[in-house]
Image (cartoon, rainbow, N blue to C red):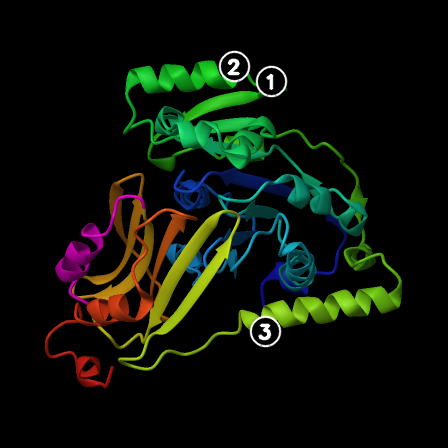
């Protein structure tokens, strides 16, 4: 058993890093690169909150003994899921006793509520919130709808530091505009750094100043529980369990994918999960996804004829990477409320099933 789990020695306040940014800014990619630079003697816990119901981002992370990845799909940690996050963090702290905690909120969430929770009484002397890092794709500033989006602006205004992602895809003029835009924000940013391909030096985490200092004993972890009267705490615990039950895993059957839909924060999502035995033609699937309107944000992890692959389309740019995920195949479409382009669920599921490899035993299952 790892020493982090068995040891009950007092621990220093756990550094917490919130990494936020608008949809498609590259948060998961940046975190994966940070993990490649992780000090070997540290155990990290990564909490990923996705707007959609299916939960794909966690599948993009390799399984490691020194890294625990917890996915919380189907809402926003900053508001709807705040009480679920609190319960989950208590469990993670007790079970894994991490040296560092990274939280990736939904790209559609306002981080203020999350910060209030992390810095509030429930986690006093337990968590040490470091720099809030916001990711910015300079190309987004060319979009009036992005500049005019309240969440987009709030995420940047609340940031301590800003990582400029997608600079490898941006023009020099777009990067200069991003620098000028950030220079006019108040309060002033502590740092702005280019992170092409999501590559941010881990020193931005490790060298952050310790804002609290101090230590806490193991029984101080009990403080990380709601401070309300017992009856109210019980009610909130029951409510949290209801939400967690809604996230309970439903195993898809071959030929019968599980479909989930959601809507909040001005966006809609539509997603499917397919049985792990079903093998897709990567070319056929790619052609189908390319036929969808460019307004759609698309994320997927699939068992394909080219192996297990992560598919990611953001701002019209598609990336494919291999993954160690083997639980099931997943695909999710996200679109702004009121925009056209989200397909009808049942008919599109049939088109997805038609992308399975010929001769795949699952393809003979009834649809």
Task: Judge whether residue 284 is colored magenta.
Answer: yes
Q: Is residue 77 above or below residue 132?
A: below
What is the spatial separation of the Cα atoms under label 1 and label 3, in whole angstroms?
42 Å
Q: Residue at x 74, y 42 (%)?
A: 119
Circles 1 and 2: CB atoms closer than 8 Å: yes
What is the spatial separation of the Cα atoms under label 1 and label 2, in whole angstroms?
7 Å
SS state under label 2: helix
Please state which of residues 90 and 113 is positioned toward the viewer in this rendering: 113
The residue at the far left in this view is 358
Q: Which of marks 1 and 3 is nearer the N terminus?
A: 1
Q: How crowded is mark 2: few (under 14 residues within 10 Å), some or many (20 or more)?
A: few
Q: Mark 3 points at which residue?
A: 245
Residue 283 placement (x, y as % from top left): 13, 58
Q: Which residue is drawn at 27% across and 29% down?
A: 169
How many numbered circles are shown? 3
Which stretch did the figure color magenta? Answer: 280-295
Q: Mark 2 points at which residue?
A: 183
């Amino acid at each position: 058993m790892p020493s982090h789990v068995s040891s009950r020695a007092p621990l220093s306040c756990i550094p917490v890093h919130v990494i936020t940014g608008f949809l498609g800014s590259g948060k998961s990619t940046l975190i994966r690169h940070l993990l490649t630079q992780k000090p070997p003697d540290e155990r990290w816990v990564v909490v990923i909150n996705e707007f959609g119901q299916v939960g794909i981002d966690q599948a993009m992370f390799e399984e490691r003994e020194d890294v625990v990845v917890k996915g919380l799909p189907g809402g926003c940690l900053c508001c709807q899921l705040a009480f679920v996050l609190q319960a989950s963090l208590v469990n993670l702290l007790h079970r894994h006793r991490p040296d560092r905690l990274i939280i990736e909120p939904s790209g559609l969430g306002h981080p203020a509520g999350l910060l209030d929770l992390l810095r509030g009484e429930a986690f006093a002397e337990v968590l040490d919130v470091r720099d809030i890092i916001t990711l910015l794709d300079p190309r987004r500033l060319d979009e009036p709808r992005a500049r005019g989006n309240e969440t987009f602006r709030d995420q940047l205004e609340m940031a301590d530091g800003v990582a400029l992602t997608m600079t490898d895809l941006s023009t020099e003029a777009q990067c200069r505009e991003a620098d000028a835009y950030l220079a006019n924000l108040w309060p002033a940013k502590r740092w702005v750094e280019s992170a092409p391909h999501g590559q941010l030096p881990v020193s931005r985490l490790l060298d952050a100043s310790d804002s609290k200092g101090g230590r806490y004993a193991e029984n101080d972890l009990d403080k990380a529980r709601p401070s309300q009267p017992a009856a109210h705490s019980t009610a909130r615990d029951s409510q949290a369990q209801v939400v967690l039950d809604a996230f309970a895993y439903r195993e898809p059957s071959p030929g019968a994918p599980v479909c989930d839909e959601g809507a909040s924060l001005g966006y809609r999502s539509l997603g499917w999960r397919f049985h792990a035995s079903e093998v897709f033609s990567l070319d056929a699937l790619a052609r189908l996804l390319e036929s969808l309107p460019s307004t759609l944000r698309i994320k997927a992890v699939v068992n394909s004829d080219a192996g297990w692959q992560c598919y990611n389309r953001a701002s019209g740019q598609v990336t494919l990477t291999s993954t160690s995920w083997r639980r099931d195949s997943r695909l999710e479409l996200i679109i702004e409320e009121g925009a056209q382009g989200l397909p009808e669920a049942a008919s599109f599921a049939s088109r997805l099933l038609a992308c399975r490899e010929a001769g795949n035993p699952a393809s003979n299952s009834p649809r």
